[in-house]
Amino acid sequence: CYASPQASPVLASLVEGVPRPFLYSLADLGPLPDRPHRNIARLLKGKRFRKPDISQTIQELLAGEVGRGSGGGVVVDVGANVGMAAFAAAVMGFRVVAFEPVFENLQRICDGVYLNRVQDQVVVYHAAASDRAGNITMHKV
């Protein structure tokens, strides 16, 4: 995430409806593509971006750990996507190790690390994770 201290503007949204709100990046507003990013289109239409179901579940599970004195542990987010689970944990004081193989999603995670000021808590790997060694080809759909 070294390139993240923002070279271009970022569109972000506050994840509300969770015990500890946080920001996540919707799109990098650098050189805009011919077709606007779908989240920008949703914003212009006044629609909500996503339900905080994943974030709510993560924070509820981790609140139980904090209640048992396990706060400040490590959360591993495999297939982190745009970081909804990672940031839900980080704002609660947990350290997070996130794996994300898709570069566009990795950029959103790096934006979120910057926006939430959790660079000391979140380590991001541009990699897939598996139970065995090997190579994989990722196709964007």
Image: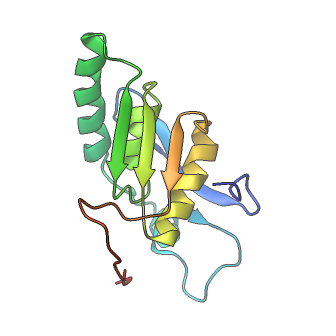
Q: How many marks?
A: 0
Counting from the top left corner in percent of width and height, residue 10 is at: 64, 59
Who's the residue at 66% across and 79% down the image? 32
Q: Is residue 16 visible?
A: no
Q: Residue furthest bottom?
A: 34
Instruction: Answer left or right for 16 relative to 4.
Output: left
Q: Position of residue 12 (x, y in %)?
A: 56, 53
Give whichever of 87, 102 is nearer the camera.
Answer: 102
Residue under the image location 39 percent in, 34 percent down: 89
Q: Nearer the viewer, residue 112 or 32?
A: 112
Would you say residue 30 is visible in this rendering? yes
- Quarter of the figure that contains the N terminus: bottom right
Residue shown at the point (47%, 30%) measured from the top left:
91
Q: Residue furthest right?
A: 7
Quarter containing the C terminus: bottom left
Q: Is residue 141 above or below residue 105?
A: below
Placement of 2 over or under 139, stated as above or below: above
Residue in the picture at 35% in, 48% down: 77
Residue 63, position in %: x, y?
28, 21
Above or below: residue 21 compared with residue 113:
above
Figure coloring: rainbow
Percent coordinates x, y for residue 26 in the rendering: 51, 60
Residue 70 vs residue 15: left or right?
A: left
Q: Quadrant of residue 114?
A: top right
